[in-house]
Amino acid sequence: MEYIGHMSINISFVIYCIYFLPQIIYNQIKHRANRISHGTHLLMVCANVLDLVYGFGFQLQWQYKMVTILTLVCLLVQQWQIYRDSREKRYPFHILLLAIIAFGVTLLSLKILSVGMLEKVGFVSMFCYAIYWVPQIIKNINAKNATAFSVVFLLLNVLALICDEISALSFNWPLPSVISPMVILSLLCIMVAQHYYYQRLRMIID
């Protein structure tokens, strides 16, 4: 079982190293980052920062920790792309996100959280991961458009989450790491379905 866990974590590590690149490239080419829900992006940043504290606090596998760092870097790039493509520059939104990142890094460097507190951080992180697609799903329904996120990015997410679930079960990771992939996977399926549904709808209208 541990051998399967090592295989899955290495596969997911490779996917997570590249999974955000299609989205960054998509944002750069299409200039549609303004269609990304601010709520979704905010929850993505919160989830990732908390995951950073959780992963380093519990000294999880190095792949887990590396992925959180790489994802945070990509989220910062996407934040700049959202700022660039938005007609209305919402400075408080961007300042809040930077403050959250700074707070998380400070909390991590101080190493003052107990095991119990780290578990709570993990559950809050899991909750943010579990719901961060919800604002985007609602925005897609209201706009009848699901082109904010690259479908390649979404499908790579699906593959990575399947590997995450296998790894969590194989290594007996804490409960937040077991539950969150299943919840996120269900919401991602809705996102992918919306992409193809609204694409088909536009083709029919055209």
Image (spheres, rainbow, N blue to C red):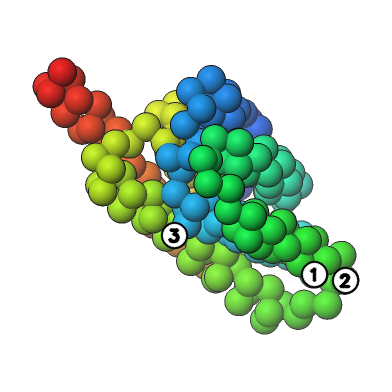
Q: In the rendered view, would you say 51 is above or below 61?
A: below
- N-terminal label among 2 and 3: 2
Q: Image height check: is 176 above or below 90?
A: below
Instruction: Give me the residue at 68% from left, 73% from top.
Output: 118
Residue underneath mark 1: 107
Amino acid type of the residue tagged 3 in the rendering: Ala
Q: Position of residue 205 (x, y in %)?
A: 12, 23
Decide: marks 2, 3 in contact (CB < 8 A)? no
Which percent across, then down, holds residue 163? 50, 41
Considering every residue shown, the one lying at the far right of the view is 110
Q: Where is mark 3, residue-wise?
A: 130
Residue 87 located left or right of residue 18: left
> What's the distance in space between the residues labelled 2 and 3, CA to CA?
27 Å
* Percent of width and height locating residue 165: 48, 50
Distance of label 3 from label 1 (alpha carbons):
23 Å
Q: How many residues crowd mark 1 within 10 Å: few (<14), some (14–19), many (20+)?
A: some
**CB atoms of marks 3 and 1 within 8 Å:** no
For the residues labelled 2 and 1, say whether their Cβ atoms are less than 8 Å apart.
Answer: yes
